[in-house]
Image (tube, grey):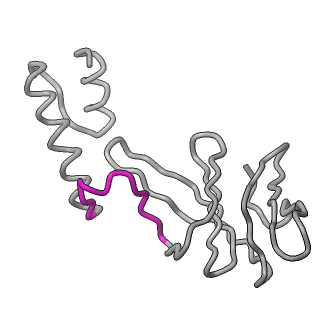
Amino acid sequence: MKVSELRLALEERQISTAGLQKKIMVARLKEWIANAQRENKLDCNKFSTLPLNCPVSIPLVVCGFGIELLFISDLQTHRILQVSIAKNGGVLKGTVISQIPLQQTALPYGFSIAMGNLFVADSNDEGGLLHNYQDQLQSF
């Protein structure tokens, strides 16, 4: 990371950079990241997980849309979660912004997003029909 990038990263976090050498700026940024992780109770061994504000019991399908949205199907609760991803430089957090209930017999095995519509491929006994859930989503 260049000194100019370090200064910008620290200033975005309201950390003064006046007269600091690169080594000290790096240390301050690392300290800020460690504090953010502690505040959010993150385990360094679980960086492959995304903390959510709502539990997901059995995630079956995950579909990303852009850089700030995920769709996750939960097989146990029979719903699709629309998740907004927020980042602050040290931590990613997921916030469920919409929940779409599915039939109790639903077995979603794929998602597709096209022109603001979410289509779900459902492999239940009625066949692999696609359902459009546009009216139940938050705008994206």
Q: Is residue 71 left or right of residue 9?
A: right
Figure check: 18 above or below 55: above
* Residue 43 is covered by the magenta coloring: yes
**The quarter of the displayed image where residue 28 is located:** top left
In the rendered structure, the answer to whether residue 56 lies left or right of residue 82 reads left
Q: Nearer the viewer, residue 119 or 98?
A: 119
* Magenta stretch, main secondary structure class: loop
Outermost residue, bottom side: 104
- Residue 24 sits in quarter: top left
Give me the residue at 21% from left, 37% from top. 15
Quarter holding the N terminus? top left
**How many tags in the picture?**
0
Q: Position of residue 125 (x, y in %)?
A: 86, 76
- In the figure, 85 relative to 126: above or below? above
- Residue 90 shown left or right of residue 125 in the figure: left
Question: Does the magenta run of residues contain 117?
Answer: no
**Position in image of residue 119 (x %, y %):** 83, 56
The x and y percentages for residue 102 are: 77, 76
In the rendered view, tell whether residue 124 sits above or below residue 51: below
Query: Residue 41 location, x and y as percent?
Result: 26, 64
Magenta span: 41-53
Rendered residue at 62%/72% (across/down): 74
Kindly identify the residue that appears in the image at 80 percent across and 81 percent down. 103
**Residue at 33 percent of width and 35 percent of height:** 12
Q: Nearer the viewer, residue 137 or 133?
A: 133
